[in-house]
Image: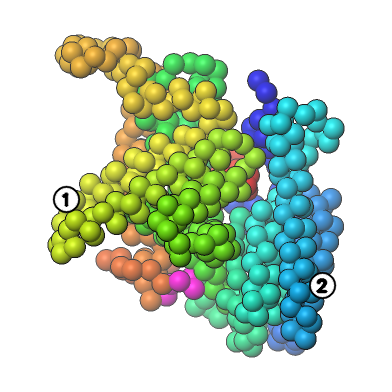
Amino acid sequence: MPYHCKAELVLKRASKGRGRRVMLFNSSIFILAFLPVTLALFFAVGRVSPNAAATLLGLASLVFYGAWNLHYVPLLLASIGVNFALSQVLGDTARRPATRRAVFAAAIAANLALLGYFKYANFFLDSAGLPNALGAIVLPLGISFYTFTQIAFLADTYKKQAQEKNFAHYLLFVTYFPHLIAGPILHHAEMMPQFRKKAIYTPNWENIAIGASVFIMGLAKKTLIADEIAPVARAVFAAADYGTQIEFFRAWGGALAYAMQIYFDFSGYCDMAIGISIMFGVRLPLNFNSPYKARSIIDFWRRWHMTLSRFLRDYLYIPLGGSRHSRPRRYFNLILTMLLGGLWHGAAWTYVAWGGLHGFYLVVNHAWDYLRKRILPNARPAGPILRGLSVAITFAAVVAAWVLFRATSFASALRILSGMAGLNGIDLPAKAGPLKAMAAKLGLSPVSQSPYISNTAILGLLLLLAICWLAPNAYQVMGAKNPALTQVEGRARWTWRPSLGWAVGLGALGAVAFTAIFTGPPSEFLYFQF
């Protein structure tokens, strides 16, 4: 099998994680030691000097990062130092426009070159059929996120929308540990003004209670749902890797299992990041808002990895021309943006294809909206049946695309996608005689039921689908106490409040989720791989 960056990076990251005591949000060392100690020190120092407390939090974030691999801390610091120095030049409006333009171009090129070397060098050499003289390159944790965060800052500084003179504050802005590893991708203007408020340097017990509640919800999603459904997806995709023919129900079971795994894994991370941050009195932007409830692909990308979508829109799609030109040009910009967004997720052509497929989806979505408004300008709002159908179609399209995202090769993805289309036969229980006869009449080839998808797993997937579609998300549950910068529409029937009932309920959930940590080594979040 040829070199495949996706598989290799995952294996290297896994071996690193198991060989070292990586400080993950879902690890006992983080929950019992790092977080409470950092909170206590932050507030203790903050009573004396807010600036010293901000500096301490930046240094603590470096410790958090260094727990993964100390050797990449100098790389992170070098990136921060160089970008801070360049931002000072860009922020000097007295300089000639041509000078600022040249510095900005050089700064962006330097950041992309750093990301390109660590993330894409071997991929491009392999794709071009050139010998690999670089050897194995381990992807530094979080490099995609802290690079994009700094690119956004440089662009905002160049446009005179941001400026930072204090290096300690800039260090904190980039390294702030709740977002450092897997986002959200921050804007300086939404982040650093919060650290200039004296109130955040005094403990706010309601904020700590809110943060702990949201953190527990995220921990439960990760340890009790995402990690538990992962083996189902792993078994099906591994079978496809080995060349096994994947039948209809097994294919859909594996694809749905991965769709649930990445949903609750990323949702859990986002909840935990926002929960941790609000304990410090700092609100992060919402990064995940029930994306499987989306009624269109446009709506999906307004709900999934929201800060990445914002970055791609503001710093790629709009500079390319956005929707300011002809309709074909707009569609080209959409597809190019999503192709590059797919490549950002990883150095593999399957990621690029995933991005391109979503670009195609977006073009179809925009074209359909345009035609619908032209043909039916006075159409009534969709009723509940049509809305439900829209959600189902959008979800099916997203699940099909996830197969490309998860698969380690196009051949593996094709085996699963063809199975989902019914081209590999239909797997039925051995005693399902009438169903086999019916399947044969429909032109499907019935086979015995696959062992990879148990009845328990099927029931679990159906339950998780119901949760995704019908249950409120954490921010709707929090109601007016929403800890994120972004507000969400809708409220849960019962919203959170500081009461004994909520404390007991969430305490019990947290105990179960925390206990799950000790069943094995803490598993990394999926977005750590990007």
Residue at horizontal 36 percent and vertical 41 percent from the top: 397
Q: Could you tell me what secondary structure mostly forms the magenta stretch?
A: loop
Residue 36, visible in the rendered structure:
no
Residue 505 figure quarter: bottom left
- The reply to whether the C-beta atoms of the residues labelled 1 and 2 are less than 8 Å apart is no
Q: Where residue 169 sits in the image (x, y, percent)?
A: 73, 77
Q: How many discs mark residues in the rendered view?
A: 2
Q: Amino acid at mark 2?
A: Ala
Which residues lie in the magenta part?
Answer: 481-486
Residue pointed to by mark 1: 385
In the image shown, does 72 or 392 lie closer to the viewer? 392
Quadrant housing residue 249? top left
In magenta stretch: residue 334: no
Local SS, label 1: helix
Q: Position of residue 519 (x, y in %)?
A: 57, 39
Give above or below for 339 relative to 445: below
Pointer 2 residue: 85
Q: Is residue 39 above or below residue 448?
A: below
The colour scheme used to paint the residues is rainbow
- Residue 360 rendering spot, x and y as whole percentages: 42, 44
349 sits to left or right of 2: left
Position of residue 329 in the picture relative to residue 82 (left or right): left
The quadrant where residue 371 appears: bottom left
Q: Is residue 90 left or right of residue 320?
A: right
Q: Is residue 349 visible?
A: yes
Residue density around tag 1, few if under 14, some if 14–19, many if 20 or more, within 10 Å: few
Residue 253 higher or lower than 217, as above or below = above
Q: Residue at x 27, y 15 (%)?
A: 444
Q: Residues within 10 Å of mark 2 (few under 14, many from 20)?
A: few
Q: Position of residue 278 (x, y in %)?
A: 55, 72
Does dot 2 land on a helix, a strand or a loop? helix
**Residue 28 or residue 8, whichever sits in front:** 8
